Image (cartoon, rainbow, N blue to C red):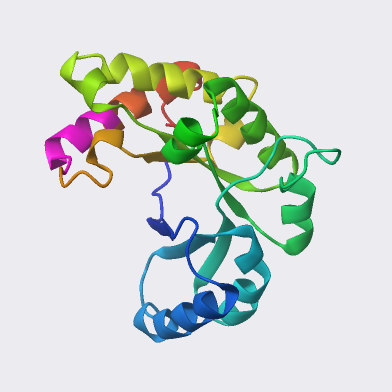
Amino acid sequence: MIMARKKIIAGNWKMNMTPSQAVELINTLKPLVANDEVDVLLCVPAIDIIPAMEAAKGSNIMIGAENMYFEEKGAFTGEISPAMLDDAGVKYVIIGHSERREYFAETDETVNKKVLKAFEHGITPIICCGETLTQREQGVTIDFIRQQIKIAFLNVTAAQAATAVIAYEPIWAIGTGKVATTEQAQEVCKAIRECIAEIYDDATA
């Protein structure tokens, strides 16, 4: 039986906002989203997580992380481990954002490692996928995104996959003034569901 999914409205503010600014924004948002019949999620920079969670208490705003590493601990200066996020009470983490892939050499393989570690700690991964303008113009969008999805879900169980969040972000539409049409977005979302159904089943997709 295919269950109805509750919609998630999620956002992140990248490397912006101090902890005090994050708290101020959350306090402004709380009354505005109090009656929404969707899950509201803010994925924030690591230093903002604790104050953001305190500010969001008692509201329907959830706090997630913008990134994490795939190791439990060790000599990885500047990284945030899944164990740290877990201990802080974080339940969502963005993995594979286009900026992480572009500026920090994140690959489909490291995305997969992070996805597996997130699940290991009971954290829901928000797995990002998306194509460049060149890939769209070459007509390889669907093939490229299917490959991203297949690698991201390697060794992920059907039960885990059913709880994952997949975020389609057309890279060519980020900060360019260009906008993906409804038809373009629906085409990709359909392809993602078909890919997940091939890996697992229709119910999971």
Front residue (pair 18, 37):
18
Residue 3 locus on image (x, y percent)? 43, 45
- Number of labelled discs? 0
Res. 204 in view: no
Is residue 111 shown above or below 62?
Answer: above
Residue 83 locus on image (x, y percent)? 79, 49
Q: Quadrant of residue 11?
A: bottom left
The span shown in magenta is 179-188
**Residue under the point 86% across and 38% down:** 74
Front residue (pair 36, 91):
91
Residue 154 locus on image (x, y percent)? 60, 19
**Residue under the point 54% across and 66% down:** 62
Which is the main secondary structure of the residues drawn in magenta?
Answer: helix
In the picture, measured across the screen, residue 179 lies left or right of residue 162, that is: left
Residue 118 locus on image (x, y percent)? 67, 41
**Residue under the point 61% across and 26% down:** 110
Q: Quadrant of residue 10?
A: bottom left
**Residue under the point 61% across and 68% down:** 48
Is residue 79 shown above or below 48?
Answer: above
